Image (tube, rainbow, N blue to C red):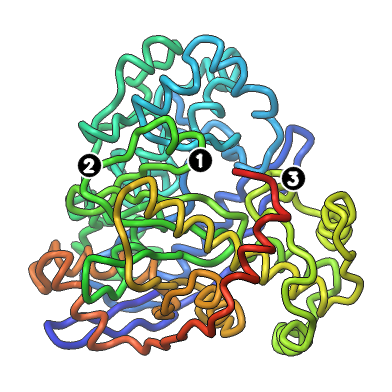
Amino acid sequence: MAGRVSTDSLELTEAHRFPNRPVRTPEGLRWDILALYAGVLDGLRAAGPVDSVGVDSWAVDYGLLDADGALLGNPVHYRDARTEGVAEKVWATVPVAELYAATGIQYAPFNTLYQLAAASGTAQFERARRLLLIPDLVTYWLTGEQGTELTNASTTQLIDSRTRSWSREIADRLGIDLGLFAPLREPGDPAGVLRAEVLEETGLTGPVPVTAVGSHDTASAVAAVPAAAERFAYICTGTWSLAGLELDAPVLSEESRAANFTNELGLDGTVRYLRNIMGLWLLQECQRAWGERDLGALLREAAAAEALRSVVDAGDAAFLAPGRMPERIAEACRASGQPVPGTPGEITRCILDSLALAHRRAVQDAQRLAGHAVDVVHVVGGGTRNALLCQLTADACGLPVVAGPTEAAALGNVLVQARAHGIVGDLTDMRRLLVRTQPLTRYEPRGGTERWRAAEARLPVR
């Protein structure tokens, strides 16, 4: 994505789009990192002259480098099964409540901490001399400089969310060598310049600085929430839904841990207090099973289907793995004694109702646990294109929903670069620019929240 920013304008254009498909090898599910890097180079070439580059991506996954800085195999994909049963072994050394009190990071089976525990003792891990999270790995290949960007590092479950630095106590107790990680850097810090070989391959003229951004895509997306006031919740929608609040300090209570809320670090000392929800992955997998049926037709069928007839827990790890999604949703409805959706339209309505219900639970729980009331819910990311999901979220939450921008992560990335180069001011200024320049759609709740409470009662207590 190429951005053009001034004090009163903000434009984003797509320079190049390429697939991101994990590959199943005999060893397990892996990132196709070389294809992704080739796509990055193609994108830089297509973007033309640029003044700065910033990289953001999914969190938690990493590449291992040997003593010469060479990559040791394709990075393991977070949906790989290698961490099954690992958390319990970690908790035998550091109980889960202590882990949360120290780091504020929710339990997820793919957290970097559990991946490291799974990798410990393998031949590849024994050879490793450096660990770079995915956006830091791409940045290293672009610049030759190694660093660990803080917003992404916070998802490893090895950062103390209060001090915003490594939790050496947790690392020591689990035998994790923090020397594997490159030095921490903040969004806005310089991350090097494009190497001569990259300039030659992309046709760019140097020097081209690379700027550290909120390299966890959710950190960049939250930075691009066009909030005019502080009393807001956000939902970053796409393959996942990340629903929560922006706070000044972490919430580390036992009740917060039990509710599976996470305290990831954001820009300018903020905390992204949120819950991970399975998101539109459920619908994406169904579309694959149905042969990529037209989304517009599916949504029209879903809108005509009976509301809240059947719902599933959209945060259930049972839906994490790919494959057989329509059958698995049907099985979940059958197991809970609800009508089983049969047609694609009914299944799509079940998914969207379930996501809206999960958004409701997350927004309500976050307000209660943080003692932070909100007046509006901002929906950003790919789900903003789904008007039915946005309206159902407003209905479920009983709050207005403001949808947009769609490319929030890219906009947050670009704005942090622009700020580092003196074009825009602080986070408040960035958001004012977004409000002035980005198309936004407002959805008012239609009432009937008692129906959502009744549907919520059919789901397991979380």
| Residue 134: quarter of image | top left
Q: Count neighbours of disc 1 (C-alpha within 10 A) and say few if under 14, some if 14 to 19, many if 20 or more.
A: some
As drawn, 363 above or below 99: below
Tell me the residue that label 3 is attached to.
318
Percent coordinates x, y for residue 255 in the rendering: 44, 35
Q: Secondary structure at mark 2?
A: strand
User: Which residue does the image show at 88% across and 54% down from the upper left?
Assistant: 331
Left or right, 283 with reference to 423: right
Q: In this view, which residue lies farthest toward the front?
A: 450
Q: CA distance from mark 2 to mark 1?
A: 27 Å
Percent coordinates x, y for residue 15 in the rendering: 43, 79
Q: CA distance from mark 3 to mark 1?
A: 16 Å
Q: Which mark is residue 338?
A: none
Q: Secondary structure at mark 3?
A: helix
Dot placed on the residue nearer the N-terminal end, 2 or 3: 2
Tell me the residue that label 1 is attached to.
260
| Residue 76: quarter of image | top right
User: Which residue does the image show at 31% across and 39% down from the upper left?
Assistant: 148
| Residue 380: quarter of image | bottom left
User: Which residue does the image show at 89% across and 55% down from the upper left?
Assistant: 334
At label 2, which amino acid type do we have?
A: Arg
Quarter of the image where the N terminus is located: bottom left
Dot placed on the residue nearer the N-terminal end, 3 or 1: 1
At label 1, which amino acid type do we have?
A: Asn
As drawn, 130 above or below 77: above
Tell me the residue that label 2 is attached to.
185
At label 3, which amino acid type do we have?
A: Ala
Number of numbered discs present? Answer: 3
Q: CA distance from mark 2 to mark 3?
A: 36 Å
Left or right, 148 with reference to 425: right
Dot placed on the residue nearer the N-terminal end, 2 or 1: 2
